[in-house]
Image (cartoon, rainbow, N blue to C red):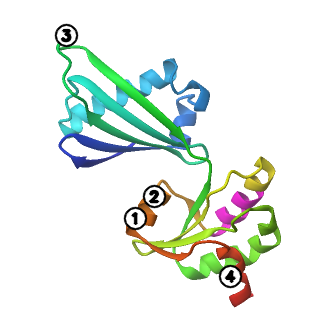
Amino acid sequence: MRFEKQTKEHLRVYVTANELSLRGIAIDTIVGENGQQLWKELLETAESEYGFSPQGAVDLNVTMFPRDGLVIDVQRGEAIAELDIEQVEIRLTIDVIHHLIYQFEDIEDVINASIRLFPHIHETEQGGTLYHYKGRYYLHFVEVLPSQVEERLAAILSEYGKTTTVSPYVMMEYGKTIQTEQAVKELYDAFA
């Protein structure tokens, strides 16, 4: 788990798919016993390492990227008078985002991946979006893809880049959008 302190009242936690797998957590088990253990561990680490002491209510807004892992926003909620000082009410919200997003160190890697992806791109609706953010390039497929197509694209993408926990929403807000649709076709047409 990687923690980022946003404010005194807000932490952002990144948990990779590998970390979830090691804990035996999947989409359908995240609210079960395994998930409860994760929340407990997360809150204990937040308190011991970041001074984030949960008292009353804590809001956990979880964004789950099935291939990549979780992004969890942890925020202190309003104090609840009826709760004992030792009790913490956890309010959990889970959003599941299905998409492919890969990070590339330089544009050459994006071009080479696009040349390899091009024969398969007709199986997607929007053909990929290309972003530049903090010195790196990101290729994002927003639509829900059939599992065979997603596996094929992911296999090619992983040869040239790596999965990332950077949210596409962060890139849209703070990065530069280079191509909103058909990024793979545009790169193929320009460089193949």
Query: Label 3 amino acid?
Result: Asp
Which residue is drawn at the image coordinates 27% and 19% (left, top)? Answer: 88
Q: Residues within 10 Å of mark 3 (few under 14, many from 20)?
A: few
In the rendered structure, the answer to whether residue 192 lies left or right of residue 56 reads right
Q: CA distance from mark 3 to mark 4?
A: 60 Å
Q: CA distance from mark 1 to mark 4?
A: 23 Å
Which residue is drawn at the image coordinates 67% and 82% (left, top)? Answer: 187
Percent across and percent down for residue 14 are 42, 45
Of the residues under marks 3 and 2, which one precedes in the sequence? 3
Residue that numbered label 4 is attached to: 186
Which residue is drawn at the image coordinates 59% and 32% (left, top)? Answer: 27
Q: Nearer the viewer, mark 3 or mark 2?
A: 2
Looking at the image, residue 16 lies above or below residue 92: below
Q: Give whichever of 90, 154 is nearer the camera.
A: 90
Q: Is mark 4 in CB contact (under 8 Å) with mark 2?
A: no
Residue 180 appears in the rendering: yes
Which residue is drawn at the image coordinates 56% and 48% (left, top)? Answer: 68
Of the residues under marks 4 and 2, which one precedes in the sequence? 2
